[in-house]
Image (cartoon, helix red, strand yellow):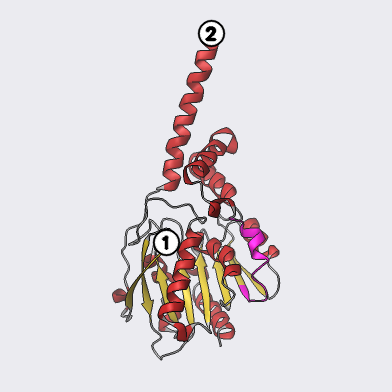
Amino acid sequence: MIWIAGTLLLAGVMYGVCWRAAGYLLSPPMSPMSHFPEHYDLPYENISFSTRDGLKLKGWFMPSPGGDKRTILMCHGMSDNKGMLLKQTYFLNKTGGFNLVYFDFRSHGESEGKITTSGGLETIDFDAAMAWLRQAKPELMDTVGVFGLSMGATVTVVSMAKHPDLRCAVVESPFTDYRTVIARWFWNNVKVPYYPLVALTIMIVRSRVNASEIELFNPVASAALISPRPLLVIGGGRDLLMPPEDVKLIFSAANEPKQLWMVPEASHTMCREAAGPEYDARLLDFFSRNLS
């Protein structure tokens, strides 16, 4: 009987640990808002819109300096915010002349929400941003592309099929599936193997959220549905969270026209820092050619 009690106690402790870990995944520490358009002398409008599940999201619309209609929807990464992405991509407006639409995913930055799901429920946020753009700026809808980074890249891959009016996309460091990226995060940070703790943690996350968007979230299958719209996939050669093999799997699943650019010295979300001026030049060239 002692061994039974010991087993039950161990199982209870394990479940408690995984419950806390699931809570961390759903509500991780978030980067503060520290970068704003004023820092780069960029005119902008504060915008807000609601998701179909009732959250208010906040964002910025940054008009083209020259009145250009070409527009890019900007999707930030996990635990970051629109300001962090602005810091890396404002050149698309200042140098390239594109209209830029930044927004914070749920529970990030200035947006409402108590949990994040690393991509599943965030597709609802993407839909809401597109709905705002169609309603508020219909004159721009003929030439809209997307830039997504990390989580935002994966949300972009999954969401493109639902929005055929999007003309093209650039995705940096997308992941292949939720289970793999979470397992890799745990291993990289605390050296916990997938079985049994990470597997149980993911099961608890799914049970606590219980949303169809989580179950249907499939970046690899979705990548094949982006064509015939052009896709540029970017990855870092030293990315330990979304390693080259994962980035290349997304690229391989996509159909033509597509391009792959691996930045050998780049770690996660640091391709611009590693590539230097070539990064800006490649993005400006891609969006200029495909949003003309």
Check if residue 219 falls in the magenta segment.
yes
> Where does the C terminus fall, quadrant-wise?
bottom right
- What is the CA distance from the residue labelled 2 to the residue labelled 1? 50 Å
Circles 2 and 1, Cβ within 8 Å, touching? The answer is no
Start-end of magenta stretch: 217-231
Q: Is residue 258 left or right of residue 166?
A: right
Residue on which disc 1 sits: 105
Whether 173 is drawn above or below 20: the answer is below
Residue that sits furthest to the top in the current view: 1
- Amino acid on which the number 2 mark rests in the picture: Met
Residue at 53% of width from left, 18% of height from top? 7
Residue 147, image x, y percentages: 51, 71
Residue at image coords 42%, 75%? 101
x, y percent for residue 46? 31, 74
Q: Amino acid at mark 1?
A: Phe
**Residue located farthest toward the bottom when viewing the structure as drawn:** 66
Name the residue located 58 percent from the left edge and 55 percent from the top edge.
217
Which x, y percent locates residue 51? 42, 63
User: Residue 90 got which mark?
Assistant: none
First along the sequence among labels 2 and 1: 2
Q: Nearer the viewer, residue 29 or 280?
A: 29
Does any portion of residue 129 appear in the rendered image?
A: yes
In the rendered image of this protein, does residue 115 appear above or below residue 195?
below
Give the secondary structure at mark 2: loop
**Which residue is tagged 2?**
1
**Image-based side of 140 in relation to 236, left or right:** left
Predominant SS of the magenta segment: loop
Would you say residue 229 sits in the magenta stretch? yes
- Residue 119 coordinates in the image, percent (x, y): 51, 56
Q: Residues within 10 Å of mark 2 (few under 14, many from 20)?
A: few
87 to 214, vertically: above or below: below
Circle 1: element type: loop
